[in-house]
Image (cartoon, coloured by chain):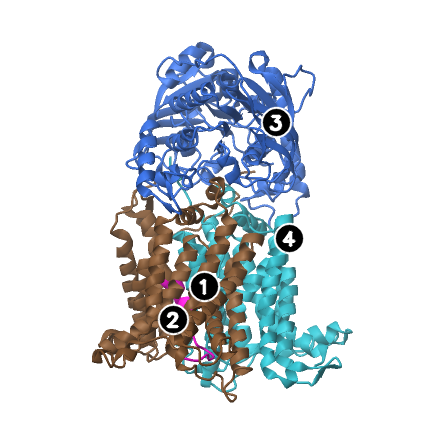
Chain colours: A brown, B cyan, C blue
């Protein structure tokens, strides 16, 4: 019997063949170019989808730009939206550097918001405490609650090797129900799904608070949380680029086995990363309740923790580029609220992310299209 | 609070998870992790529901739903198999994209009134079996019965057939399979898309049978992720996946029903009096997934159970350099 | 039956003269050119194979032997040149096309699915059984085929239960079952003990007697002369001797053709003067990754200024031994370095006690492929001054050190910012050695330090080891290459199934006796040296 009994391969014969050749070096301009390129492609694809379902993509995009960068007032609103995105984006970028897929920034954000609210609502501090005491206490509580929420998947991953993607996602849902319990139950304001408004001492200072001295700032809602974000970006950058631990993070991120061989305590790094990552997301939650909403309520996040994933990716896990990407997405979220259908921003985000990862192949390979000669 | 009623409903809701988990088992057995189940289910759910609203034909809706899930998964297949992108990130993108797209497509569907559903059946003789009869064979959607058949069929396919042998080889050691003429890319495409079809079916099971209606991304509400957790719990075995799916279905059903009676099994029922406590019940399935993963992972360390060895790693065909 | 029917049409062709017509040749390669980015792997290579012969392809690592045979086996496509099989021109798109034409290759790295049985692995890719996996009939067929060619293996065994030698037999069976009449074997003896090599040779002879032919790729002269009917030598992508009869040549000529100069096989070494006890391993037991016992009561001593070789067939606990000593694997028992207990301490402890480790897996363990050369070179010293500066890193100091090491060890790369994965095998190994040796280790654990390197690189590595020996480093050299151990080590310990079978002075050891011990034969019949 002949060996030609194996199943036949079905193939389509094209006159040209596309070959991928591994790149030996990557030109410096290529990575940012691909980022910009994939955003452009994603916007184009989304426009087509929009047009197909009966929307007007040009008007929608123009609207997004107008409504986010058109005046100093909306620019301020954009920065307000960008603030939680910077912090959650940093949380993701830090974890992703070590190839830890912390998809739980959303839950850590919610727990941070809860922790900060708890300081006011339990109350932890005596009524009438000055802002100089209340605000740091809320920051600490927000950071710690987010950090503890991050610690759970961190410890499970480091000690038992449990997949962090699933645990962080499950914890998102648990955090959502946890906050709902407090908002609908013990902290409910007369049966509504929100808590009482915080006293002024628990509000983060805003630019508009300075309007008496600088009239230009009147009505600008940018708050101190933006400074948290910028400082955090600088700190994370320094840790990653200049510290011994940053070197270990890069080592683990590239090859855990090589890191272990080099004597790095991987488990400790995993736990620490999750602690800080969760803490940053928690701080974002604190800054949102204390700087914007001034109370805890259901649906406090329009998915900041998920958008953060895309931001981290778009920034190539670079803390400073996270800030830029966060501002862009802040604009998208701000303006996207008024766009119908409501799923458009999420769809654009997904398309951008797909564009990015698809374009990565171009970083690794050079694409050669060649004419296919006669049988070789 | 009849336990039989809860278990009967648990099997029905568990069927949603079952289809998604079986699909993911097939994809992962071929070596491709697809974290986009949530997105694919939403696409299936909205496509199926939209079709029924437009045509009134639930069977057509079922087919469209599966095609929608399959088409969504095809994107993941192209990106991870041909472009060799990171499977984790691609799966996440798929969830984003599926969620966003489903919401765009589902615009207006939430106002649709009652629609035609897939029929329910009671199996004559089997329904009289003690305990099991009323749980498994009474007034269940036709899709629940499809689930009963799918489980052993999948097991047989994977473990006892030649295509199954090839599937396992592709997930364990694609280089070996390719060297002997098994087309790794083609098989991976096939099983990723099979996973997508089943995820679409899972979505349709929600909107066309078990919990009809369109509620945006709350329609699926994280069940795609639970299904992925179930696969690990099930150790890539269809039978254990069925056990897990029905169990989860029963628990989530219980948390819905718990507000009703003032006593449960003769005990004072706190959920009846303080409704906000039911949020803790709602957490239960998610907590359980984490617990299951911890147990599963410890077992995994001890027994090196059936995770496909090449899961998550791209296969690069052809020339391997110098 | 698949294998039986096709015993080669030209069984009687063994007696052909060199001027035989092309149609009588099983395989004919003419003017093969294959380029990879940066190098020409095959430069107008001719090669032919007659039915019923063993034709050896001899050359150093990197000479282009495997590339040429990968072309013949359908894995690569040639850029130029012509392939003929039994006189007919062919073009293979995949290994499967080659197999269909009767050509099968057994690679150095086996491609077997560990969780499946021997029979399942052999049937993979065929369209039989039709649908349902009923294996009884096929198991019988395979057992019969195995017996015919002297390939001892249980068709029902799972691959992960088999030794490396048995796995090789499965690879051969895979090809025979597909009716292959040309078998290409890539460095088949690298993983075998001397006695297993004999067994393999008997199988190959049984095949040629049945009219099939074999291409035998090797860089070992002795083996090639023992098994081959004809020999083709390659160097740097070109043929330096085409199809000479084994009877008409000798070791010296072949060595010159292979390396291009007279081979300096003797290494200068200082007299053996062992110093203080550095490494003391006592009664160590450890499990492998599958949780099965890998080390069973291992005890060893290594002294300053001494190289102790560990000889053994792959998979007998060598990797686990290195991992236990360097803290990468948990164990029971005692591991002392300079009198200090370090068993079950984290890897950092061994590093800080002056234990260097040249790991077996250079790309997965020994280096971080996507980090720069500089980052890879400071891997073992980023915690200490001058690279460390408090809890930050002094990047300038790191780069200074990296540049110095690159120059001293001649790591060939455009800059220290080049990613490590772009280095060739020899350069990567030099990087690892540079990093490990530069810390002036008291103890060096080296696993397969020269595997896959060319002769020049091997000589350089060997010199480094002897330099360190002269400087008083204690070295544990784990190698599957017995010749390497005999050339470098002062004493040799043989490991088999996780047990030390005996420790001998290299001067007093014979290859035959070591070979017996490596395969578990004749334990304790030899007078052991000091343990």
Where disc 2 sits, the SS reads helix
Q: Name the residue rendered at 26%, 56% in the picture.
A: A33
Same chain for mark 2 and mark 3? The answer is no
Same chain for mark 4 and mark 3? The answer is no
Residue B222, how many percent across, how many down? 52, 70
Residue under pointer 3:
C149
Tell me, yes or no, whether the two marked residues, 2 and 3, touch with CB atoms within 8 Å.
no
Q: Chain of mark 3?
A: C
Q: Which residues are magenta?
A: A294-311
Residue B96, how many percent across, how many down? 42, 67
Residue under pointer 4:
B299
- At label 3, counting other C-alpha atoms closer than 10 Å, the crowd grade (few under 14, some 14-19, many 20 or more) is some
* Distance from Cα at disc 2 to Cα at disc 1: 25 Å
* Foreground disc of the pair 1, 4: 1
In the displayed structure, does residue A15 sit left or right of residue C474?
left
Where disc 1 sits, the SS reads helix
Residue under pointer 2:
A346
Q: Which mark is residue A279?
A: 1
Q: Is residue B67 visible?
A: no
- At label 1, counting other C-alpha atoms closer than 10 Å, the crowd grade (few under 14, some 14-19, many 20 or more) is many
């Amino acid at each position: 019997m002949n060996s030609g009994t194996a199943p036949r391969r079905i193939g389509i014969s094209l006159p040209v063949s596309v070959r991928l050749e591994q790149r030996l070096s990557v030109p410096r301009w290529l990575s940012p170019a691909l980022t910009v390129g994939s955003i452009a492609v994603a916007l184009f694809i989304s426009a087509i989808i929009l047009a197909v379902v009966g929307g007007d993509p040009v008007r929608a995009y123009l609207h997004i730009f107008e409504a986010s960068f058109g005046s100093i007032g909306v620019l301020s609103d954009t920065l307000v939206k960008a603030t939680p995105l910077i912090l959650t984006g940093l949380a993701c970028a830090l974890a992703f550097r070590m190839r830890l897929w912390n998809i739980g920034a959303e839950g850590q954000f919610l727990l941070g918001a809860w922790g900060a609210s708890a300081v006011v609502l339990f109350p932890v501090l005596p009524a009438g405490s000055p802002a100089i005491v209340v605000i740091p206490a809320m920051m600490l509580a927000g950071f710690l609650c987010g950090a503890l929420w991050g610690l759970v998947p961190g410890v499970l991953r480091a000690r038992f090797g449990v997949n962090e993607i699933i645990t962080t996602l499950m914890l998102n849902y648990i955090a959502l129900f946890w906050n709902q319990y407090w908002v609908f139950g013990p902290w409910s304001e007369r049966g509504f799904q929100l808590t009482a408004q915080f006293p002024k001492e628990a509000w983060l200072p805003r630019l508009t608070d300075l309007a008496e001295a600088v009239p230009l700032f009147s009505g600008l809602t940018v708050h101190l949380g933006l400074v948290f974000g910028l400082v955090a970006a600088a700190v994370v950058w320094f840790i990653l680029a200049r510290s011994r631990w940053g070197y270990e993070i890069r080592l683990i991120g590239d090859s855990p086995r090589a890191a272990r061989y080099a004597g790095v305590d991987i488990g400790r790094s995993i736990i620490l990363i999750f602690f800080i990552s969760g803490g940053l997301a928690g701080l974002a939650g604190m800054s949102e309740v204390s700087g914007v909403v001034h109370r805890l309520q259901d649906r406090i996040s329009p998915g900041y923790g998920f958008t953060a994933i895309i931001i981290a990716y778009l920034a190539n896990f670079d803390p400073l580029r996270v800030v830029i990407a966060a501002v862009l997405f802040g604009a998208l979220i701000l303006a996207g609220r008024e766009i119908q259908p409501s799923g458009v921003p999420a769809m654009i985000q997904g398309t951008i992310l797909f564009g990015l990862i698809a374009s990565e192949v171009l970083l690794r390979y050079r694409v050669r299209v060649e004419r296919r000669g006669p049988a070789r | 609070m009849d336990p039989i009623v809860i278990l009967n409903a648990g099997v029905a809701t568990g069927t949603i998870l079952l289809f998604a988990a079986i699909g993911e088992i097939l994809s992962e057995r071929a070596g491709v992790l697809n974290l986009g189940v949530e997105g694919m289910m939403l696409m299936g759910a909205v496509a199926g529901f939209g079709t029924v609203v437009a045509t009134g034909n639930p069977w057509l809706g079922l087919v469209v739903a599966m095609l929608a899930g399959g088409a969504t998964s095809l994107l993941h297949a192209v990106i991870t198999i041909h472009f060799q992108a990171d499977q984790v990130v691609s799966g996440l993108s798929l969830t984003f994209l599926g969620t966003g797209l489903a919401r765009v497509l589902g615009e207006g569907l939430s106002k649709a009134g009652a629609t035609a559903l897939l029929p329910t059946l009671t199996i004559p003789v089997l329904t009289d079996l003690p305990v099991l009869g009323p749980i498994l064979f009474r007034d269940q959607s036709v899709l629940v019965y499809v689930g009963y058949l799918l489980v052993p069929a999948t097991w047989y396919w994977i473990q006892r057939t030649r295509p199954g042998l090839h599937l396992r080889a592709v997930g364990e050691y694609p280089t070996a399979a390719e060297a002997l003429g098994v087309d790794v890319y083609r098989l991976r495409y096939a099983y990723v898309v099979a996973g997508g079809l089943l995820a679409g079916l899972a979505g349709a099971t929600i909107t066309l049978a078990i919990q009809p209606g369109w509620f945006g991304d709350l329609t699926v509400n994280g069940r795609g992720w639970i299904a992925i957790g179930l696969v690990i719990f099930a150790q890539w075995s269809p039978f254990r996946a069925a056990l897990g799916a029905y169990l989860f279905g029963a628990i989530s059903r219980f948390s819905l029903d718990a507000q009703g009676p003032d006593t449960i099994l003769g005990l004072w029922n706190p959920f009846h009096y303080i409704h906000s406590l039911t949020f803790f019940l709602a957490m239960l399935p998610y907590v359980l997934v984490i617990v299951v993963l911890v147990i599963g992972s410890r077992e995994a360390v001890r027994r090196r159970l059936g995770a496909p060895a090449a899961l998550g790693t791209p296969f690069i065909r052809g020339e391997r350099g110098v | 039956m698949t294998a039986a029917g096709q015993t080669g049409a030209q069984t009687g062709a063994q007696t052909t003269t060199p001027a035989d017509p092309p149609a009588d040749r099983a395989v004919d390669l003419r003017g093969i050119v294959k380029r990879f980015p940066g190098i020409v792997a095959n430069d107008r290579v001719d090669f032919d194979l007659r039915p019923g012969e063993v034709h050896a392809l001899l050359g150093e690592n990197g000479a282009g032997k495997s590339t040429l045979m990968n072309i013949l086996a359908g894995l690569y496509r040639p850029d130029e040149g012509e392939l003929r099989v039994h006189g007919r021109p062919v073009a293979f798109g995949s290994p499967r096309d080659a197999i269909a034409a009767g050509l099968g290759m057994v690679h150095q790295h086996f491609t077997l699915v560990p969780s499946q049985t021997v029979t399942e692995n052999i049937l993979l890719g065929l369209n039989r059984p039709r649908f349902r996996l009923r294996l009884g009939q096929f198991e019988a067929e395979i057992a019969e085929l195995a017996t015919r060619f002297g390939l001892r293996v249980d068709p029902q065994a799972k691959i992960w239960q088999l030794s490396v030698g048995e796995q090789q037999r499965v690879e051969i069976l895979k090809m025979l079952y597909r009716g292959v009449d040309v078998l290409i074997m890539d460095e088949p003896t690298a993983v075998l003990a001397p006695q297993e090599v004999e067994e393999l040779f008997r199988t190959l002879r049984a095949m040629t007697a049945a009219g099939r032919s074999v291409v035998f790729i090797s860089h070992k002269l002795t083996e090639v002369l023992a098994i081959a009917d004809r020999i083709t030598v390659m160097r740097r992508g070109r043929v330096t001797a085409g199809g000479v009869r084994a009877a008409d040549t000798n070791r010296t000529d072949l060595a010159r053709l292979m390396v291009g100069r007279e081979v300096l096989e003797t290494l200068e070494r200082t007299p053996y003067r062992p110093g203080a006890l550095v490494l003391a391993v006592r009664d160590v037991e450890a499990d492998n990754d599958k949780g099965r016992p890998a080390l069973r009561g291992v005890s060893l001593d290594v002294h300053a200024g001494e190289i102790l070789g560990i000889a053994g067939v792959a998979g007998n606990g060598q990797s686990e031994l290195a991992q236990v000593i360097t803290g990468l694997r948990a164990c029971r028992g005692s591991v002392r370095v300079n009198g200090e207990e370090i068993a079950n301490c984290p890897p950092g402890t061994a590093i800080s006690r002056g234990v260097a480790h040249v790991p077996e897996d250079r790309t997965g363990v020994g280096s971080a492929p996507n980090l720069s050369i500089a980052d890879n070179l400071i891997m073992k010293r980023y915690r200490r001054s001058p690279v460390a500066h408090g809890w930050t890193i002094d990047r300038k100091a790191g780069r200074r050190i990296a540049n110095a090491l690159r120059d001293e060890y001649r790591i060939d790369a455009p800059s220290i910012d080049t990613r490590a994965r772009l280095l060739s095998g020899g350069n990567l190994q030099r990087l690892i050695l540079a990093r490990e040796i530069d810390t002036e280790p008291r103890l060096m654990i080296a696993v397969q330090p020269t595997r896959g390197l060319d002769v020049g690189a091997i000589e350089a590595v060997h010199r480094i080891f002897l330099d360190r020996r002269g400087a008083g480093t204690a070295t544990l050299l784990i190698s599957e290459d017995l010749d390497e151990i005999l050339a470098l080590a002062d004493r040799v310990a043989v490991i088999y199934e996780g047990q030390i079978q005996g420790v001998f002075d290299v001067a007093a050891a014979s290859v035959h006796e070591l070979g017996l011990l490596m395969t578990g034969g004749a334990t304790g019949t030899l007078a052991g040296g000091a343990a």
